[in-house]
Image (cartoon, rainbow, N blue to C red):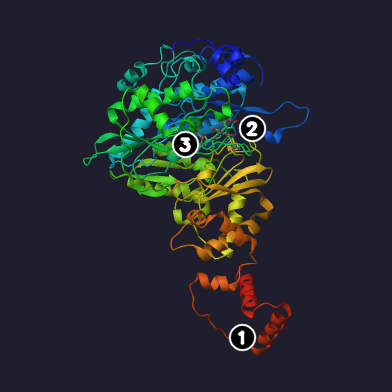
Amino acid sequence: MVQTPISPSEKLSKVEYIKDRSNYLREPLATELLNDSTHFTEDSIQLLKFHGSYQQDNRDHRAKGQEKDYQMMLRTRTPGGFVPWQLYLVLDKLADDYGSNTLRATTRQAFQLHGILKKDLKTVLSTIIRNLGSTLTACGDVNRNVMAPPAPFRNRPEYDYARDYASKIADLLTPQCGAYYEMWVDGEKIVSGEEKPEVVAARKNSCGHSHNDIEPIYGAHYLPRKFKISVTVPGDNSIDIYADDLSFVVITNDQGDLEGFNVLAGGGLGRTHNKEATFTRLADHIGYVDKNDIYDLVKAIVATQRDFGDRTNRSHSRMKYLIHEWGVEKFKAKVEEYFGKKIATFKPLPEWKYADYLGWNEQGDGKLFLGISIENGRIKDDDKLQLKTALRKIVQQYNLPMQLTGSQNVILYEIEPSLKGQIQAILEEHGVITDTHKISILTRYAMACPALPTCGLAVTESERAIPGILERLEALLTKVRLKDEKIVIRMTGCPNGCARPYLAEIGFVGSAPEKYQIWLGGTPNQTALAAPYAEKVSVSELESFFEPLFVNFRENRQKGESFGLFCGRVGFENLREFAANYKGDTPKKAKSRAGRKHQHRIGVPDEFYDRLKQISDEQKRPMNQLVTEALQKYFGE
Ligand code: SRM
Ligand code: SF4
């Protein structure tokens, strides 16, 4: 593939022309970085993404006739979620010195800094780069942060392989043009870790179709759209592998040695309301590849998307659409042509499980790791909870490395058991809960995207709204006697799907101010797509909307069945019919749930009995219903 400039008559999407005239991600960004403006122009905004930053404005501060409150968001490149302690301390300080005093753990094992002014961008970025960090390709039309299970097990080699290959695949697909280091650290090539020779060699031997010396894998126009990869181990779906463009599952032999990888491709969640041509899609099982061929297969798949992905319409450019339209067989045949070999058959795998790795755990080498729950990934200090201070103190004092999880939490590891008490004391002193039983069960498994005020695409609140919504749902679950029921709830402020709501048991997808499309039917291990159950449900009608669904679930679930599986099994028609006929949570239902054959009898004084009978006759409602309601009120349910 010899790179030729594209002609304006080709009618490609406008970002393609921006990439084309950028001289490999440089201009006009490099020039605009030096001017005094508070913000960048459109061309630079698009290029900035490849460097790991988005231009945003604080939407709470928008005022008619006034310039927007421009600020930049920065996202780290942290394959597998690994954050060395030095980098964490630097990010923590940068957030205070230049940002919004918060750090945000993302759904793809990265950190985001919000609120950086354009004039400070170079200082912040160069500080990250000089302290073992990078933001290169955290955003843009390239491979994004590669995910891997965050558990730092030391006695399970498959976890090491997953982490190691996540990092090596990230290196393989890192842009080579040099613009990043040129722009942010004046040309110094600072890399946080040496690339493995096998990766360097694989990049040079570039798939047979590309002759671009500057960007051997991508070419001058990079990919048609963002590209997401993950590497996991059999059974561990802590990172939602079915949502990615490309996923690998480590396959080892009986001795624990790496043999190869199962390959999945074509996942993606982004969609637009009322645009049927855009849709969520789970990845397909493509096949199996020997470990020696892994880089060639990655390149073949990336090159297939590079050459055949849609560059005319960005809402149709993700690889999922290519696979959907071609079908798996045609896609596989094209990849095999690029790969130069047949892809073998997908190996059988055990059932997928979701694990959040919270609380204290054994690493397997005598040391401990501690998973800390972070509400919506936001690391901050407030009156009740000083999570940011607590984490800084611990990381500073004990120099502990960190693993970001795929569910907006962090894991501290390499902890000597003798330090457990001290670390626990610092956390408790700052209000941080580590006992997983004390974390609200809904909060523990929930995620929400940032949405307002920083996200330019948000149509309604998400991160700021979800705590109140979870509290109300928890009260409702208690009321209908489903207290402590585990339900995976995820929320986004628009349909792009950043907190992966389409894989949740209840997905709230922003559809208008204070209104959400409700998706139901995802599974607790995130292997099935939910489906849209209701449009534009208002936050004000939360209880009346969910009560019939929860009561139906309580009455008709099978033993051990989760809410998501129940919704999927009985179907939306059943759920809608039950809701339409719902007249309140009657005692009869309550009785059947408990599986009781007989009602318990208790005595009441005659005068109460007479009054009860009278009200019952007047209201034409059974006496036991009246008593139950009165008791529910008394018990505060
Ligand atoms: Fe996302 C765009 C935040 C994971 C699908 N995403 C955005 C932007 C950058 C808004 C923008 O383009 O202006 C958001 C910045 C908000 C802010 O203020 O910080 C944003 N996405 C996030 C994060 C921070 C959400 C979070 O709560 O953690 C996640 C960062 C991940 C990371 O570290 O790299 C994040 N985004 C995802 C995921 C989940 C995943 O990858 O596992 C998805 C769905 C999976 C997928 O890609 O299909 C996702 N984000 C999108 C899309 C829709 C893409 C599409 O194919 O249509 C957009 C909009 C776009 O690209 O045009 C988007
Ligand atoms: Fe913004 Fe929408 Fe992503 Fe939420 S889901 S961060 S609102 S783009």
Q: Mark 2 or mark 3: which comes first in sequence?
A: 3
Whether ligand 1 has any atom under 8 Å from the Cβ at mark 3 is answered as yes
SS label for mark 1: loop
Label 1: which residue? 604
Query: Eyeballing the image, is 488 above or below 326?
Result: below
Label 2: which residue? 456
Q: Residues within 10 Å of mark 3 (few under 14, many from 20)?
A: many
Q: What's the amino acid at mark 1? A: Val
Can the viewer see residue 550 in this picture? Answer: yes
Residue at 57% x, 26% y: name it.
Answer: 314
Q: What distance separates the C-alpha of mark 2 from that of mark 1?
A: 62 Å
Q: Mark 1 or mark 3: which comes first in sequence?
A: 3
Taking depth in this image into account, of 325 and 515 the one nearest to the observer is 325
Whether ligand 1 has any atom under 8 Å from the Cβ at mark 1 is answered as no
Q: What distance separates the C-alpha of mark 1 from that of mark 3?
A: 62 Å
Whether ligand 1 has any atom under 8 Å from the Cβ at mark 2 is answered as yes
Q: Residue furthest left?
A: 255
